[in-house]
Image: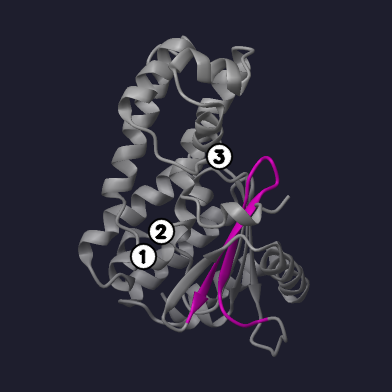
Amino acid sequence: MALPRENYKISPELRSFGAEIRQLREAAGLSQTDLAELVNVSRAYISHVELGKTRCRCDFASRADAALKASGRIVQAWNELLESIKSVKYAAYFVNFPKAESTATLIRVYETHIVNGLFQTEAYATEILTDIKDVPTRLGRQKHVMGDPAPTIFVVLEESVLHRQVGTIEVMQEQLEYLLELSERDGIRIQVLPTVYVKEARAAFAIATQADRSEAAYMVTGVGGMTSAEPEDLAKLSERFASLQAEALNVRDTRALIRKVIEEKWT
């Protein structure tokens, strides 16, 4: 199910915190009105917090934690929310997507020019990123997204990505060998799109799907990128990804091609 229109610009961090409140409230068998009375706020305020429409104060988190007998869980979530808002250093055009990506159960990626950030080695990422201080952020993103339980990930990447030199020959060899390793993992499917004209092969994009089937998409543009939860955008991108998969090599043939490129070009 696509995100409702009024939630398009809601911070993923706030959405995640609100979901935590809602989960604990429902587990306690309380309605929004019940919780509102216990913490001395309006029912509408509880609703806004749970939907991620407002950032509550620390004192509310403390009162809610006590009312729901959460043993500090809500206070900890509030502190983590504050830290994530203060410290995450993603590019401005990317800031709304990482949280959706980190909680997704399914991620679909189409890449046209470089290996996707989730699959980059440290050496490859160091060559790609303009600021060396951004490398730990990228590696941390990989660890968080691909931790246990990891989402199912489908990737279609242009064949040219395998041939485009980023850094030294050694960097490319390590990167492609890492792609091979990843392709053997459960839940990760990597397919190469041959160098042929495909109508749907335009700009790179990624779609993150949550357990409740809500989705967010990140689309590369000429000046960076944008995040969208527009149902129309999501429908078009899902259809486009299916077409790209249909034109791509299967997983086994993709592995064979990657090995061939390593042997012929990067060894």
Q: Which residue is mark 3?
A: 51
The amino acid at mark 1 is Ala
Q: Which residues are magenta?
A: 201-221
Give residue 55's position: percent from left, percent from top: 40, 39
Marks 1,2: beta carbons within 8 A: yes
Secondary element under disc 1, as helix, strand or loop, is: helix
Q: Is residue 239 above or below residue 25?
A: below
Q: Which residue is mark 2?
A: 95
Left or right: residue 16 compared with residue 152? left
Displayed quadrant of residue 126: bottom left
Q: Which residue is mark 1?
A: 92
* Quadrant in which the C terminus appears: bottom left
Secondary element under disc 3, as helix, strand or loop, is: helix
Q: Nearer the viewer, residue 200 or 161?
A: 200
The amino acid at mark 2 is Val
Displayed quadrant of residue 250: bottom right
Q: Decide if residue 264 is in sight here.
A: no
The amino acid at mark 3 is Leu
Left or right: residue 214 compared with residue 138? right
- Verify whether residue 56 appears in magenta: no
Left or right: residue 156 compared with residue 161? right
Any mark on residue 118, and which? none
Point out the tag, 1 or 3, that comes first from the N-terminus.
3
Mark 1 to mark 3: distance in Å? 23 Å
Displayed quadrant of residue 233: bottom right
Give residue 114's position: percent from left, percent from top: 46, 74
Residue depth check, mark 3 versus mark 2: number of the one nearer the observer: 3
